[in-house]
Amino acid sequence: MPTTSRPCGQLRTALDGALADVNDRIRRLMGQPASKDRTQAYQELLTEWGDRARADVEPAA
């Protein structure tokens, strides 16, 4: 069964920009002192990241 792979090192779509935005927000958040608010914000960002990344997954046949 043939598979399609993405070329290494190339940006794919605007989705990459959206994920990069979430990644940047996560990095900035991790620079803050640990707190319950930071933990909650981190959880929300991880959920957002997962939702955006999931949009790039094709369903199995």
Image: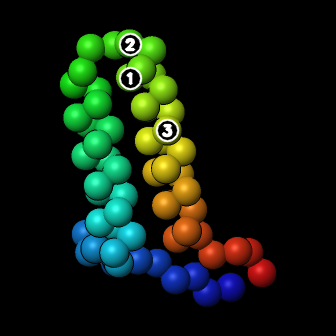
Please tell me whether mark 1 sits on a helix, a strand or a loop.
helix
Q: Is residue 14 above or below residue 16?
A: below
Residue for point 34% across, 13% down:
34
Residue at 22 percent across and 25 percent down: it is: 31
| Crowding near the residue tagged with mark 3, few <14, some 14–19, many ≥20 C-alpha atoms within 10 Å | few
Dot 1: within a 10 Å radius of its alpha carbon, few (fewer than 14), some, or many (20 or more) residues?
A: some
Instruction: Pick whichever, 36 or 47, lies toward us.
Output: 36
Residue designated by label 3: 44
Image disc number at residue 35: 2
- Badge 1 amino acid: Arg
Quarter of image, res 11: bottom left
Residue nearest the viewer, comparing 61 with 13: 13
Q: 7 or 26, which lies in front?
A: 26
Residue 38: mark: 1
Secondary element at tag 3: helix
Marks 3 and 1, how far apart at CA: 10 Å
Can residue 37 be spotted in the picture?
A: yes
Checking the image for residue 14, the label placed there is none
Residue in view at x 48 percent, y 26 percent: 40
Alpha carbon distance from label 2 to label 1: 5 Å
Q: Is residue 8 visible?
A: no
| Residue 34 in the image: above or below residue 28 | above
Q: Residues within 10 Å of mark 2 (few under 14, many from 20)?
A: few
> As drawn, is 14 to the left or to the right of 60?
left
Counting from the top left corner in percent of width and height, residue 29 is at 29, 31
What type is the residue that disc 3 sits on? Glu
Marks 2 and 1 close (CB-CB < 8 Å): yes
Mark before the other along the chain sequence, 3 or 2: 2
